[in-house]
Image (spheres, helix red, strand yellow):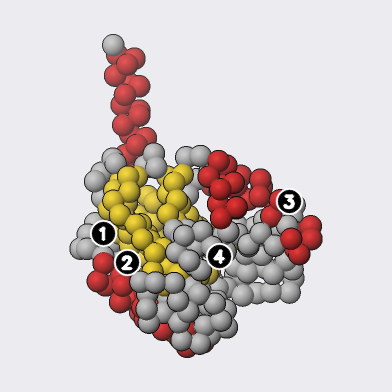
Amino acid sequence: MKKYFLTCLVLIIAVAATAQTLRVATFNIRYDNPGDGPNQWKNRKVALAQQILDEKPDIVGMQEALIGQLMWLDTALAAYSRVGVGRDDGAEAGEFSPVWFNRQRFDMLASGTFWLSPTPARPSKGWDAALNRVCSWVKLHEKATGRVVFALNTHFDHMGEEARLQSARLLTDTIGSMAHDGELVVLTGDFNAGPGSKPIGLLAARLTDTRSAASVDGVMPQPATFNGWDAARYTDCIDFIFCNKNGKPLSWRVFNQPGGYLSDHYMVMATLGWSR
């Protein structure tokens, strides 16, 4: 009986400790492009999935995922569920910006996708964007505590400067209208814009850039999150994780890819505490 009690106590402590933090990742996995030569999806998918499994994020926002990649990841990431639709038809066509979540920790309350355009309710291209762009989202109920996490994931246009700025405004407005008091909001994405840009500045004025957890004397790091298959050439920091006031950034990290590239971006992960 004593042994049983101690075992239960250890399990309760372990669950409580886990519930104190939230691990959130963003990962542009690079679409399945046969022209990528040795960096084709088929050559890196196993190692990419293993990195996610090893690091155990609770929530992962991905970008550039095609339906075939997602179907393969459904099996590889068996403990996770995903939400999101293809940007070209609202179903399976085109790239997704899916949100994955650990279903052992969370139940899904609601989910959806909107387009980064003046007509967000339907497949559309906004402003001067070159392509359709979306934001997929999910509201999650934490089983152990009852807390709610509102997770959004997006991929800003790579060409349209005005589109990136207007997309940032649309996101802040949407979060303002959809997030309820007490919910922890996390926003992940490939924003195709750097720390000093207007879109990132607009988002950072309303949300916390989790890189602050790795700041030194108030200066946030700007390591490359995009490698372009050539890490010696590119130094762009364009992948971000933001949170609202209900989250407290505890750590932030860009993951290296030893032994070959897992994608033309690195996985980025932030560990958050709960402010409330």
**Where is mark 1, residue-wise?**
183
The answer to whether the residues at label 1 and label 2 have Cβ atoms under 8 Å apart is: yes
Question: Which numbered disc covers residue 244?
Answer: 2
Location of the C terminus by quadrant is: bottom left
What residue sits 56% from the left and 55% below the top? 67
CA neighbours of label 1 inside 10 A, class few (<14), some (14 to 19), many (20+) = many
Q: Nearer the viewer, mark 1 or mark 2?
A: 1
Q: Nearer the viewer, residue 1 or 26?
A: 26
Residue 258 visible within the image: no
Give the x, y percent position of residue 233: 73, 74
Q: Is residue 102 left or right of residue 32?
A: left
The residue that mark 3 highlights is 43
Q: Nearer the viewer, mark 1 or mark 4?
A: 4
User: Disc 3 versus disc 1: distance between alpha carbons?
Assistant: 39 Å
Up the image or down, 97 lies above or below 140; here it is below
Foreground disc of the pair 3, 2: 3
The secondary element bearing badge 2 is classed as: loop
Residue found 34% across the figure and 14% down from its top: 3
Q: Which is nearer the N-term, disc 2 or disc 4?
A: 4
Q: Is residue 31 above or below residue 106?
A: below
Among the two numbered marks 3 and 2 on one chain, the one whose residue lies closer to the N terminus? 3
Which disc number belongs to residue 94? 4
Where on the picture, by quarter, is residue 201?
A: bottom left
Distance, label 2 to label 4, CA atoms, is 30 Å
The answer to which of 55 and 220 lies nearer the viewer is: 55
First reached walking from the N terminus: tag 1 or tag 4: 4
Give the amino acid type for the residue marked by disc 4 in the picture: Gly
**Mark 2 or mark 1, which is nearer the start of the sequence?**
1
